[in-house]
Amino acid sequence: MESPLEEETKMNAEPERKFGVVVVGVGRAGSVRIRDLRNPHPSSAFLNLIGFVSRRELGSVEGVPQISLEDALSSQEVEVAYICSENSSHEDYIRQFLNAGKHVLVEYPMTLSWAAARDLWDLAEQKGRVLHEEHVELLMEEFAFLKKEVVGKDLLKGSLLFTAGPLEEERFGFPAFSGISRLTWLVSLFGELSLVSATLEQRKEDQYMKMTVCLETENKRPLTWIEEKAPGLKRNRHLSFHFKSGSLENMPNVGVNKNIFLKDQNIFVQKLLGQFSEKELAAEKKRILHCLWLAEEIQKHCCSKE
């Protein structure tokens, strides 16, 4: 992966052409995407924001016009779709835009099933289009710190607990999918993992949910991942990694995460411009599909016990 400085240097040349972009969904992520597209950044110079698609009748947002899904799919001007809608709708939107010959950037998780993600990747390859799943958690200062901390160390055991307010499963998917960024951290730090066990504790009347997942590294080292959600629970990560050479308990304050969605856009534009090697793209695809496969296995484990 290039450093942000190298990325910007590559994109400082005056673009020969601009890719027309439509943003689908104008919630938190969609609003940030629109802001980044409208501001003068090196990667934004290669992109031309044409409009946004929303199920709500909004007319315009910050001067950006609303367009219908049909127009976005059929327009020759639209070459790229940013899918920022609810997780449950991602698969359908990706399929429609790829079939219409558009490049796609989608917020994670790409889909709520492993097989669907595999099919969509096959479709993108058939159509010769870029399919990019956003993973801003890998662009955070905390992740950069962890990556440096764990390199070359022999893990004995580890755990990652994430707490937050409740999420509607119908809209955001099973907790292993809606929380896939935590799984992506673990896989990116310690390599491919296998599932040992998974349980889900729920009290629907209290909007309480706790998912406990026991994973294992290829060297049979145990990793525990817990997602706990309830009203009033603060959004927080608690981690503990024990190595032969010492321990890492919780995250020090490593600075503010600046422009992580913009950094993700830089990566996407590099893909549009063909600046990633086949090897890099294949490794990323393998990691994403592995995480989605694990999420699905966790869901099967939890649901078989209900």
Image: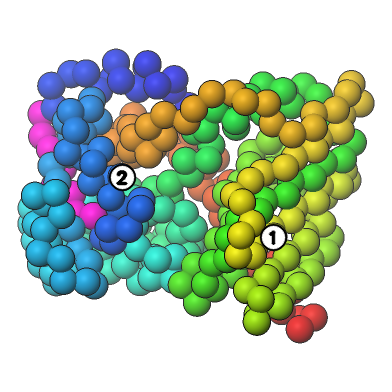
Residue 157 location, quadrant: top right
Looking at the image, residue 157 lies above or below residue 305 = above
Residue 93 in view here: yes
* 225 on left or right of 15: right
Q: Residue at x 22, y 71 (%)?
A: 56
Residue 62 versus residue 78: which sits nearer the camera?
Answer: 62
Whole-percent x and y of residue 133?
Answer: 43, 50
Identify which amino acid the numbered label 2 is placed on. Val
Whole-percent x and y of residue 150?
Answer: 74, 26
The coloring applied to the image is: rainbow
Badge 2 density bin: few <14, some 14–19, many ≥20, Cα 10 Å: some
Q: Which residues are magenta?
A: 16-23
- The kind of secondary structure element at disc 1 is strand
Q: Earlier in the sequence, mark 2 or mark 1?
A: 2
Q: Which mark is residue 69?
A: none
Q: Residue at x 54, y 73 (%)?
A: 169
Is most of the magenta stretch helix, strand or loop? Answer: strand
Q: Which residue is mark 1?
A: 228
- The kind of secondary structure element at disc 2 is helix
Identify which amino acid the numbered label 1 is placed on. Glu
Residue 146 versus residue 128: which sits nearer the camera?
Answer: 146
Asked whether 198 falls inside the magenta stretch, the response is: no
Q: Residue at x 75, y 71 (%)?
A: 200
* 249 on left or right of 244: left
Whole-percent x and y of residue 27?
Answer: 32, 58
Q: Where the C terminus falls, by quadrant?
A: bottom right
Q: Which mark is residue 32?
A: 2
Q: Residue at x 54, y 67 (%)?
A: 167
Whole-percent x and y of residue 301?
Answer: 75, 72
Residue 290 in view here: no
Between the residue at mark 2 and the residue at mark 1, the CA separation in whole angstroms equals 27 Å
Total count of labels: 2
